[in-house]
Amino acid sequence: MGYRNDLLSSRAIINHGSFALIPPDGLVNNVIPHFEDARISIIASPKLGASFVEYLVDFNPGGGNRKGFGGNGVESFVYVVSGELEVKVDDETYILKEQGYLFCPPSKSMTMTNKSVNNTKIVLYKQRYIPADGVGEPWLVCDNVKNLQVNLYEEMKDVTLVDFLPTSVEFDMNFHILTFQPGGSHPYIETHVQEHGAYLLSGEGMYNLDNDWIPVKKGDFIWMGPFVHQATYSVGYEPLSYVYSKDCNRDPEI
């Protein structure tokens, strides 16, 4: 990166066990076994307070993870921000283009390879699956956001929601894209047991995190822990949109 021309500063906010805002300019490259020709940053983990692990990965041409990611009780998910990725599960091969995604169930692992001539940027996620009595295992899901139904969020015409995975109780998590047109907002400040990991795909906004209003923009990552106040306004000239995880369909243990 070379020498800076200004004072060292950061927009990052880290409140362990509560919430975090992680902008792209502070990310570092993590070396992780079996990830080759890639720049990978761990943006959420139990060390932060999250119950999952999330990564931003930029694969060079030919880069990938050919050893296998997930499995042995760990479910995994990949979303292509830009580029094209080949994903293999068992003997099946899936080609994920921009906005393509794949959910891999906890009994299986996936390999990933960037076979294109350009870099491929992905959001990668894993968490330990929570089984439920009398409920079967979730199944592999592969699709592209362009094929999915866009729904109004809370009946508001300037806020839309896309669900990636089935809402069936076999799934203990889901991914969504929430999009706010300029001036759009949540209808109320949410407080709930679910936690989120949200990667901002476009736009700018003001996000309420634990009742502090914080400016956010494209490229930021937000972790929201359970019961943290959360809501946003979209500001600027383009929609504020983010892809985010949510735990669901399970009764909390005591």
Image: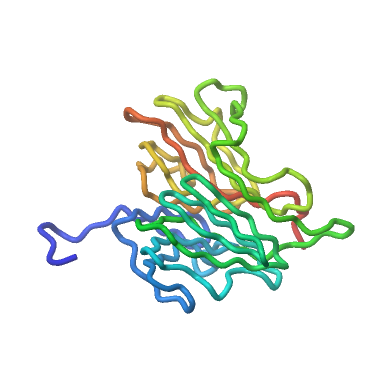
Q: Residue furthest left?
A: 5
* Residue lying at 44% horizontally and 62% vertically, measured from the top left: 114
Residue 131 lies left or right of residue 186; in this view the side is right
The residue nearer to you, when weighing 244 against 112, is 112
* Residue lying at 44% horizontally and 65% vertically, measured from the top left: 42
Q: Residue furthest bottom?
A: 33
Q: Position of residue 132 (x, y in %)?
A: 82, 59
**128 shown above or below 116:** below
Q: Position of residue 9 (x, y in %)?
A: 23, 57
* Residue lying at 53% horizontally and 47% vertically, measured from the top left: 100
Q: How many marks?
A: 0
Query: Which quadrant is home to the C terminus?
Result: bottom right
Q: Position of residue 230 (x, y in %)?
A: 52, 42
Q: Position of residue 214 (x, y in %)?
A: 38, 43
The residue nearer to you, when weighing 195 against 107, is 107
Query: Which quadrant is home to the N terminus?
Result: bottom left
The residue nearer to you, when weighing 199 against 184, is 199
Answer with the quarter of the image where residue 134 lies.
Answer: bottom right
**146 shown above or below 254:** above
- Indicate how the structure is coloured in the image: rainbow
Residue 129 lies left or right of residue 76; in this view the side is right
* Residue lying at 45% horizontally and 53% vertically, measured from the top left: 84
